[in-house]
Image (cartoon, rainbow, N blue to C red):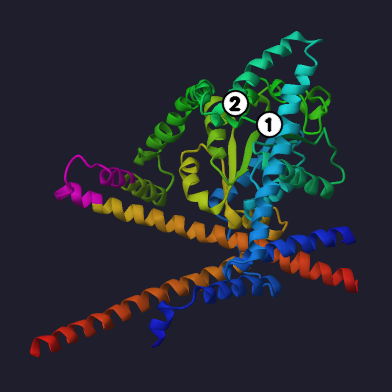
Amino acid sequence: MNFWRFLLKMDRRIIFVLVGLAVATPLVVPLNLPVRVTEPVRRLYRAINEIPSNSKPVIISVDYDPSTVPELRPMTLAVLRHCFRRKIPVIVITMLPAGAGLARDAMETVASEFPGSSYGKDFVYMGYKPGASLVMVGIGQDFQGTYPADGFGKPSAELDILKGLHNYDDIAMVLDFTGSSIYESWIMFAYQKYGCKVGAGVTAVMASDAYPYLNTGQLVGLLGGLSGAAEYEQLINWPGNATIGMDAQSVVHILIIVLILLGNIAYFVTRKKHGAAQVAGQGQKGSS
Amino acid sequence: MTGLELFWTWVAAFLTLSIYSFLYKDNVFYKIAEHLVVGVSVGYIFTINWFQGLHPYLFHPLAKSGQEPINLLRLIPFFLGLLFLLRISRKYNWLSRFTIALVMGISCGVSIPYTIEARLIEQTKASMIDFTQQPSIWAGICSAIILVGTIATLVFFFFSKEHKGVLGGTARVGIVFIMVGFGASFGYTVMARVSLLIGRLNFLINDWAKGTYHFIFG
C-alpha cells in the first residue's frame, strides 16, 4: 500500500490522537500567537464603553448550558469584567433552567474580583424564569411584575439596582450569551418591539447565522465562539481561558487544513491511478 | 484547592476521560458517564423548574390565596398545564390539544410580526444599496457583493422555470455563494468543536493534573 492509499484508509483514531496532541501541546507550552480584534467584537466593546457609569443597568442573559461552557463562559466573564470595571450596573438572568447555576457562578466569579461592588446595588441575579419570549415581553411592560423577586427570593422592591426600573426604557442594553436561537427572540422583542439595544455572544457554529443581524444593525456587536471571547479579552486587557485556548485553536486549524489538503490530493491521485488501471484492464480484455 | 475540591476535580476528570474513551471504542466507563449525564441533567432541570418556576409562581401564591383571592386565577394555567400530562392517556390525550393550541396561538401571535420584521424586512432593506451613501469604495464593493449574492441565491431557489440561459447562469452564481456560506459554516463548526476539546483538555491539564501536583507537593 502506498502513502496515498494509506492516507485514505487511515484509522480515524490516528486523527483523534493528532488532534489531541495539537490541542494539548500549546496548552502546556504556550505559543502566544497574536489575536487580531475583528470589527464585530470591537463594535460591542465600543457600545458598552458608550454606556455612562453608574447609570442605566445592562441585562446579561446567560442562556447556555454546560455543553457550550468552553466557548461562552469566557466571553460572559470578559463582558462582565468590562461592565464591572466601568461601574455599569448588571442584571444577570437566564432563560434556561440548566443555565441557572452557570449564570450565578459567572456573576459571583467576577463580583469576587471587584471587592468594591455590592450585591443589589451594582449587580443582581434574577435567576431562571420559564417562558423566554413572554418574559422578554413582560420586561417591556413591567420589569418588577415579571420578576417580583431575585434569584434568592429577595423582593425586587428592596433591591437598589431595580428601583426606578420599569421597562426597557430604563435598560441600557441587553447582552445575550447563548448556544441557541434565543438571541433572535431578544432581537424580536427587546429591539424590534421596544427599541432596546441588543448585543450577542454566540457559539462559533451559530456565528454565521448571526452576521445578518449584525449587518442590519439589529445587533450592536457580536462575539463568535472562542475567538470572539479571546478578542474581547484583548480589548479589556484581561487575558483569560479564551486567550489561552486560541494557540491550540490555531494549531488544530493548521492540522485540519493539512489533513483536508492531503485527503483531497490522495483522493485525486488514487482515482487517477485507479482510472488508468481500469483502462489498461479493458484494453487487455479487448485484445484477448 | 481544598481536599473536597480536589475530590470533585478527580470525579470530573474521571467522567471526562470516560466520555473520551468512546473515541477508542464503546465501553462500560462511557456508558456509566453517559447515563450519569442524562440522570443528573433531568434531576437538575426538574429541581430548578420547581424552585424557580412552579413553587414561587404557582404553589406559593396558591397557598397564600386565602389572603389574596386573586391568586386563585393561577389555577387556570395550572389546570391547562395538567392537561399536557394527558398525552400519556390513550383515552383522554385529545384534551391536551386545548393547551397545545393555546400555546401555539399565543406564540405565533407574539412572534410572527417581529419575525417578519427582523428576518425579512430588515434583511431586505439591508440588501438595497444607495451608492451615494457608502462610507468608502470598499464598503460599496461589499454591499454590491451582498446584493448580487442575495439575488443569485434567491434565483437558485426559484424552481418554477428550468435553470437555463440567464436564469441558469444566475443560479450557478447562486451556488457559488451558497458554497461559500457552507464553507464559512464548516470553518466555524470546526472551531466550535475544537473549542469544546480545548475546554476539556484545559481542565485536565491545568485543573486536574497541575491542581493535583500542587495539592501534593505544595
Vertical position of residue A120 compared to residue B196: above or below? above
Which quadrant holds residue A241? Answer: bottom right
Q: Secondary structure at mark 1?
A: loop
Q: Secondary structure at mark 2?
A: helix
Percent position of residue A178, x then y: 60, 44
Vertical position of residue B203 compared to residue A132: above or below? below
Crowding at dot 1, Cα within 10 Å, few <14 / some 14-19 / many 20+, comes out as many
In the image, taking residue A133 as reference, residue B182 lies left or right, namely: left
In the image, taking residue A236 as reference, residue A34 lies left or right, namely: left
Q: Nearer the viewer, residue A62 or A222?
A: A62
Q: Main secondary structure of the magenta part?
A: helix
Q: Nearer the viewer, residue B145 or A70?
A: A70
Q: Is residue A99 visible?
A: no
Q: Residue at x 63, y 35 (%)?
A: A174
- State which chain disc 1 sits on: A
Which quadrant holds residue A98? Answer: top right
Q: Label 1 is placed on what type of residue?
A: Lys
Q: Is residue A160 visible?
A: yes
The answer to whether marks 1 and 2 sit on the same chain is yes
In the image, taking residue A80 as reference, residue A14 lies left or right, namely: left
Which quadrant holds residue A283? Answer: bottom left
Which tag, 1 or 2, sits closer to the chain's start? 1
Vertical position of residue B13 compared to residue B85: above or below? below
Q: Which residues are magenta?
A: B150-171
Q: Residue at x 32, y 80 (%)?
A: A270
For residue A134, the mark is: 2
| Residue B166 forms part of the magenta stretch | yes
Q: Label 2 is placed on what type of residue?
A: Leu
- State which chain disc 2 sits on: A
Q: Which residue is mark 1?
A: A129
Percent position of residue A254, x then y: 51, 71
